[in-house]
Amino acid sequence: MNFLKKMAITASAIAMLSVGAQAGEIKVGSAGGVTGPIAELVAAIVKGRQIATEHVNSNGGLLKGDTMKLVIADSACDPKAAVDAGNKLVNVEQVVGIIGPSCSGATNGMVSSVTIPAGVTVLSDSATAPSISELKDKDTVFRASASDAYQGKAIADMVWKAGKKKVAVTYSNDDYNAGIANVFVKEFKALGGEVTGNQAHEPNKASYRSELSTLAQGGPEALALFAYYGSSGITIVKNSLENGLFGKFYAADGMFDKSVIGQIGADNLKDNIWITQAASDTEDASYKNFAEAFKAAGGDPEAPYAAHGYDVAFLMALAIEKAGAADRTKISAALREVAGPEGEVVRPGEWAKAKKLIADGKKVNYQGAAGVNDFDANGDVTGLFSVNVVGDDGNWSRSMLK
Amino acid sequence: MADFINFYFIPGLLLGSIYALGAIGITMTFVILRFANFAHGESMTLGVYFAWSLVQITGWHPLVVMPIAMILTVLYALSIDRLFYKPLRNAPVVMLVVASFGLMLMTRSVIQFFWGVQLKSVLPGIQKPILVMDYLRISPKHMMIMASALVLMFAVHYLLTYTKIGKAMRAMSDSPELAKLTGIDTEKVVVATWVVGAALACAAGVFLAIDTHVETRMGFKLLLPMFAAAILGGVGRPYGALVGGLIIGLAEEISSYPFIGTEPLLNPGYKAGVAFAIMIGILIWRPSGLFKGKVF
Amino acid sequence: MDALYGYMLYGISLATMGGIYAVLTLGLNVQWGFAGLFNAGIAGFFGIGAYTTAILTTSATHRHIGGFEMPYIVGFLAAMLICGVIAYLVGKVCLRLRSDYLAIATIGIAEIFRLILKNETWATNGPRGVSEIPKPFEHWPEPWNQFGFLLLVLVVVAIVYVLVEVARKSPWGRVMTAIRENEPSAKAAGKNVENFRMEGFVIGCMIMALAGALMAHYLKFVDPNATDPLLATFLVWVMLIVGGSANNKGAILGAFLMWVVWSATEIVTSRLPDELAIRAAYIRIFLIGLMLQIFLQKFPQGILPEKRPDVAKSNGNAETKMAD
């Protein structure tokens, strides 16, 4: 077992060399699937987190002027990688709390195996699986994005109100889209609608013509499409329109991206596609604050879950400020206090104001770019949903779903 | 019936010709260099990214820049051979398989590093198909792909039948020992194999990208069907690979046709397994494939 | 003090993951190191093991079949058994052909298994995975629960190591080496090559299933990502080649070493500026791949080269005969 000893020494030497945290730096873990199947979505989410951190640091920083430092760890959308990432963040980096990971599976693995036993608070921006609500987490697992149950219902309501009585459903067979599709089908049937076909599809195939042709049987009026735009969504819309199989599409936020218009063309999509999105009102002051900052940093504020990324980083900062110390055991309780619903409203970018309120001992209610963020007993939010259509200018145009 | 042809048969044929072009490279490396090249899919992806970059720079149609992308892909394949495969030429062949397996992930990570993981497109917008005889829907884009694929297939046929190097390649694939005895320059044949394989892989990738989009894992997704096509056609048989590719492509698409009732025959979620099932079947009953290929 | 305690916990997690990988690598060593078989679908067998124990040991839920609440040991044994049967069927088809076919078939098995996991939602909860898998010793106070699990992993590593080492030194192991080195002469000596290969392949896969089962309990969660080729196939190959194929100590060394390299490099790359830190993940994969290539070309023996059992001392001739 000699080599084990050697390895332990080398490992700790590497760790010692590289850790050396600077004084006045408070570390927050930023776990995300920067590699792996949804890396393209995660890039924007991580950008959102970074912008929030900059807002905090350029407006007085945390506590007594400490800087907030996000430590990136790759959870790769894979529980194995996420557990390793979580271990490093919790034990080596000694982070105060963790924001992320991005995928439900990665979140499930990381919190069950690492953070719940260690008592570290995790605040995910895009894990939406209902099973996360049910974990026995000692109140340490929070989410800023609504569980699928909410969005599935929101889409079902929208389709039903649009007068569509018969729809076909197809979903990409991954944890996120399968979950929403499942809820949608249940809710739509409960409203009295008819689902003429319901099929999973394997993402990343070259063509979906045969699947779509089968789904088009039985006279559906529209296609409810639950997929990521990149791995199958765009191909499905293209195949459908090119072959006249479906003309109307209802989709959830995995489909929302500029490249959908870029690749299919605004004229082809106008009045034909409705995409719901977990997002706050674009008219809302909170969102405007965020969008302005995000655009200035060269990003597209409408990218899926980018606003959530901003919110979790900002919320974590508020919680640390509220706790009054970089103490992991106090974050969970502090998080509940700064998220509302009571207290004075704080919006994205308003760090200086929030800092003063907390210093004065006043209650703070963060109203995030992506919604009001009032956590329920499970640490979940209900979330707001918007619907996106192609507007006259050939870009996405957003309105709130009531 | 119209539905069957439009939405199952034609897409199957299209996908099949993409598989076929890719499988030619696999089958030739398998028989001439004697190993299953797991990195072949990534050559394809890299070729597509070369083409995408060229389209961005020049603004030309992807098919126009494709020859340049093919040359770049060939250069990549040759340098990989020089750096990673040649030093192992005298080692046990299975070492080459391990090396190619590693190169598969290395190449992909290089692509992801330089080009990022954002989805890209070489030909944006949609094309409405032309209606032929009132019920056949044929998209111009697909005609273009099929025509180009046919041209390439004929080029391969010409190369193998009428050129000196092509004949040497065939001789090598029939019997390497005999070929060496008759004075064929082995290294030259190896180079030719990489050239043909990489160029066709690039073309197949660009066709796929024209039909769909550009993505860093597109080559890997095609790897298994391409292997299946090569084995189905018979290892070392380029014409076998063509036929094998077409059969696999058609089988994948047609497997979800509602032959009985209105439900698909096979849950489309299992489509990707069709190629594998065919391959296992062939390995059990006729390992030499349809065209009496090599069995190692 | 806190920092030291943290390093210790991280050290435990490194050792636990390293240990699980050591089991995997030992399994691969039986296939590749002893029998010269190329398994490119390690992730598939790993995943089968993980799911088997996950479904057998979890309590009832509406999400997937199960509710058996079996003890861990049953989960481990069942995982190995099921994997053994599947490996036997795969071997039956592929082992009479050259190693490349096995490589293609095994990568296919991993793919098919992933499709089944995702599509048979009634049984596996589809892409959402199986959660709340019990973890041995999880009710012990921190950090003893972590220690407990590490101990369990190390015990498994030790048992597998001893068994595999005994097998290697036995006549069976020597016949395996003979087949790998010179198949025609092994055949000429009257050995049934196909049977020996089959045994090597099946045993290797069963060990991989055991590693999968350990991982499922460690993570408390499995989803179809378990069959992802990067972390469960590629990394294991690198571990074995770097550590030294055909040497069981080398396999274990490679597993721990490469896991530490893989995991700890991220601590370094996370210090880079944000843009780079994100992309650095790809450089890590590239460098590990490069390391594999360098070892293949320059040090094909790995860090700890193969040691042949001493024939003279163990009276080999007599024993080899018994292996027929």
Image (cartoon, rainbow, N blue to C red):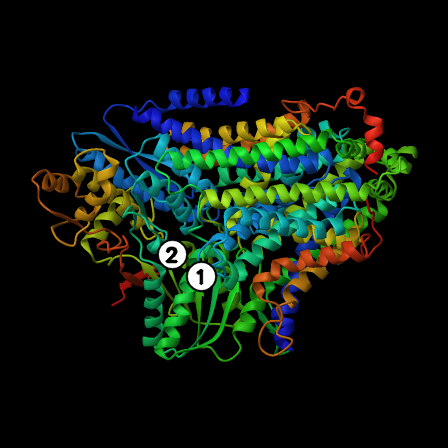
How crowded is the residue under tag 2: few (<14 C-alpha within 10 Å), some, or many (20+)?
Answer: some
Same-subunit check for callouts 2 and 1: no
Q: Nearer the viewer, residue B266 or B294?
A: B266
Residue A384's quadrant in the figure?
Answer: bottom left
Residue at the (78%, 50%) spot, across then down: B238
How crowded is the residue under tag 1: few (<14 C-alpha within 10 Å), some, or many (20+)?
Answer: some
Q: Nearer the viewer, residue B154 or A400?
A: A400
Question: What residue sits right under mark 1 in the picture?
Answer: C63
Horizontal and vertical percent for residue A159?
36, 73
Horizontal and vertical percent for residue C268?
42, 27
Residue at the (68%, 24%) spot, across then down: C301
Question: What residue sits right under mark 2 in the picture?
Answer: A131
Name the image quarter holding the C terminus of chain B. top right
Where disc 1 sits, the SS reads loop
Q: Are marks 2 and 1 in contact (CB under 8 Å)?
A: yes
Q: How many marks?
A: 2
Residue sitting at the far left:
A360
Q: Nearer the viewer, residue A122 or C278?
A: A122
Identified by mark 2, the residue type is: Ser
Where disc 2 sits, the SS reads helix
Identified by mark 1, the residue type is: Arg
A29 lies left or right of C31: left
Horizontal and vertical percent for residue C186?
85, 35
Q: Chain of mark 1?
A: C
Name the image quarter holding the N terminus of chain B. bottom right
